[in-house]
C-alpha cells in the first residue's frame, strides 16, 4: 500500500525460520485504516502505522512473496522488475473488502488465540524509546 505521506509502498515482511520454508503457512494481511498488520500462522509478525490517505496513483501491481527493485510506482511501469521472487506454491488467495476481526483471523488461521510474534526491538537497556524528526525539509 502506498500513502500520500510515504513514497513507495508499505513493506511488511517476516523471514521463516530455517527448515520451515517448504511447510504450508497461513499468511494474512489486514488494514484497519491506520495500522497494516501481517499475521503468519496466527502470530503477528510485522505491522506498520500508516500516515495520510491511501493513494490510488501507484500503478505497480501487487506482489505476494516479492518486492520491486524500484521503490516508487509512478509514471510508466512497463519496465519495472521484481526482485526476491517467491519460488514456491500458493494454495489460495482471498481478498476481503472489509477489516477482519480477531475471531475471523483465528478461524481462518486455525488457531485458538492470536499471539504477538514480533521481535522485541524496544527493550534494550540503552535504546532510545522515541526520537523527533522533521516531517519534510523546508525549501529556502
Image: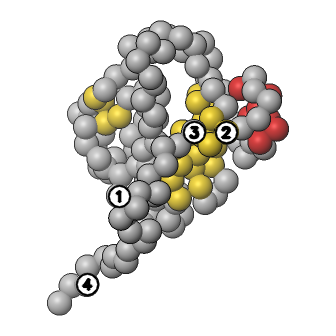
Q: Earlier in the sequence, mark 2 or mark 4?
A: 2
Q: Is residue 97 visible?
A: yes
Find residue 112 and report its horizontal and vertical position in percent.
80, 30
Q: Earlier in the sequence, mark 3 or mark 1?
A: 1
Q: Which residue is mark 3?
A: 117
Question: Which tag is nearer the camera, tag 2 or tag 4?
Answer: 2
Q: CA distance from mark 3 to mark 1?
A: 27 Å
Find residue 108 and report its horizontal and vertical position in percent.
75, 26
Q: Earlier in the sequence, mark 3 or mark 4?
A: 3
Q: Which residue is mark 2?
A: 115
Q: Are marks 2 and 4 in contact (CB under 8 Å)?
A: no
User: From what the image shows, is residue 40 above or below residue 132?
Assistant: above
Relative to 121, is 107 on the left or the right? right
Quarter of the picture holding the C terminus? bottom left
Q: Earlier in the sequence, mark 1 or mark 4?
A: 1
The residue carrying pointer 2 sits among few (fewer than 14), some (14 to 19) or many (20 or more) residues within 10 Å by Cα, namely few
Q: Nearer the viewer, residue 122 or 138?
A: 122
Q: Which residue is mark 1?
A: 7
Residue at image point 52% right, 60% down: 50
Count all numbered tags in the image, as a single digit: 4
Residue at image point 53% right, 59% down: 49
Relative to 130, is 94 on the left or the right? right
Amino acid at each position: 500500500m502506498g500513502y500520500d505521506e510515504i513514497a513507495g509502498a508499505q513493506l511488511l515482511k517476516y523471514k521463516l525460520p530455517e527448515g520451515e520454508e517448504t511447510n504450508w503457512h497461513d499468511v494474512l494481511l489486514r488494514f484497519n485504516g491506520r495500522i497494516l498488520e501481517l499475521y503468519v500462522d496466527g502470530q503477528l509478525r510485522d505491522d506498520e502505522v500508516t500516515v495520510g490517505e491511501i493513494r490510488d496513483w501507484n500503478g505497480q501491481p501487487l506482489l505476494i512473496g516479492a518486492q520491486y527493485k524500484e521503490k516508487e510506482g509512478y509514471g510508466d511501469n512497463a519496465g519495472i522488475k521484481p526482485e526476491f521472487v517467491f519460488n514456491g506454491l500458493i494454495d489460495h488467495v482471498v481478498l476481503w473488502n472489509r477489516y477482519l476481526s480477531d475471531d475471523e483471523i483465528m478461524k481462518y488461521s486455525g488457531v485458538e488465540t492470536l499471539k504477538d510474534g514480533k521481535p522485541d526491538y524496544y527493550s534494550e537497556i540503552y535504546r532510545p524509546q522515541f526520537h523527533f524528526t522533521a516531517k519534510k525539509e523546508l525549501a529556502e
